[in-house]
Amino acid sequence: MPLRRRSRPPAPGDSTPGYPEVDQEQRSLGLLVNNAGVGAGRDARRRAVSRDGYELRFAVNYLAPVVLTHALRAPLRAAGSAQVLNIGSIGQSPVDPDDVQFTRRYDGMEAYTRSKFALAAFTFTIAEEYVCDGIRVNCVHPASYMDTTMVTEAGVRPWSSVEEGTKAVLHALDEGVRGSSGQYYNESRRAKAHRLAYAAETQRRLTSLTDQLIAPTRDAGGTVW
């Protein structure tokens, strides 16, 4: 589905105000898989940022899926029966609400696990909200240390293959077709994410912090991720 940044500020009545514009020729979307990811990197001590100043792992692994999912809610709703699948990780650690951008004692792997915790919490938050639109939202850890650039770049010897991860993703999608929503899958098994990802106060606070983070780019008419 083509997306383009707004060339003007959002106006009242816009279907997805403040988010990347959805090409109006695309009326519906049956599936959104949020799969983009940045790992710990070659030097886990080096804090990288996106072009618009966000801590890179949090931006790519969490904020971008949030913005994209919200932007595509209308065409997902129009499909009548759609799915959002977030590609998460078994590695999850709570976000520090006092240092969301991880400016103190930075560690790339910790940044990665924080972003994946946030993605899981986001999954459970919107699953309840989106159910009225017929949109099922799930999260899956496809496999551990697959043979991807993300893994080899970090100097880790792969434990599993992309093919194994693909099977887990397809299994989660099959579960969604059967009606599952708000679930976390560890490979091909229904499992539990970090316990705090289910906590209402955690979800509320993370949503508030996220809104504050994305407000500047949203109000400016888009992002440069």
Image: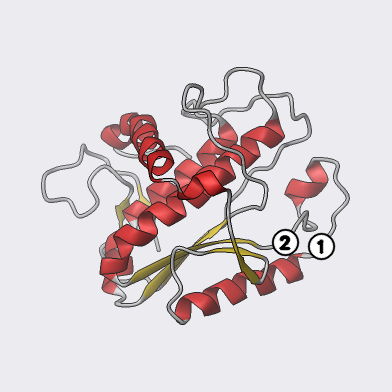
Foreground residue among 51 and 137: 137
Residue drawn at (51%, 51%), measured in percent from left and top? 120
Find disc 1 in the rendering and name its residue: 160
Circle 2 residues within 10 Å: few <14, some 14–19, many ≥20: many
Pick out the residue farthest to the left: 12
Residue drawn at (53%, 74%), measured in percent from left and top? 173
Q: Are marks 2 and 1 in contact (CB under 8 Å)?
A: yes
Residue drawn at (22%, 46%), measured in percent from left and top? 17
Q: Give percent across and percent down for residue 182.
A: 45, 63
Q: Is residue 61 visible?
A: no
Dot 1 amino acid type: Ser
Dot 2 amino acid type: Ala
Task: Indicate which disc residue 183 carries.
Answer: none
Is disc 2 placed on a helix, strand or loop?
A: loop
Q: Quadrant of residue 114?
A: top right
Pick out the residue farthest to the bottom: 178
Is disc 1 placed on a helix, strand or loop?
A: loop
Pick out the residue farthest to the right: 157
Foreground residue among 58 and 14: 58
Residue 225 versus residue 187 in the image, above or below: above
Q: Quadrant of residue 93?
A: top right
Find disc 2 in the rendering and name its residue: 143
Q: Is residue 107 left or right of residue 139?
A: right
Q: Is residue 114 left or right of residue 217?
A: right
Q: Quadrant of residue 8?
A: top left
Colouring scheme, one of rainbow, by chain, secondary structure, one colour: secondary structure
Q: Give percent across and percent down for residue 38.
A: 64, 43
Q: Give percent across and percent down for residue 139.
A: 53, 60
Q: Give percent across and percent down for residue 156.
A: 85, 45
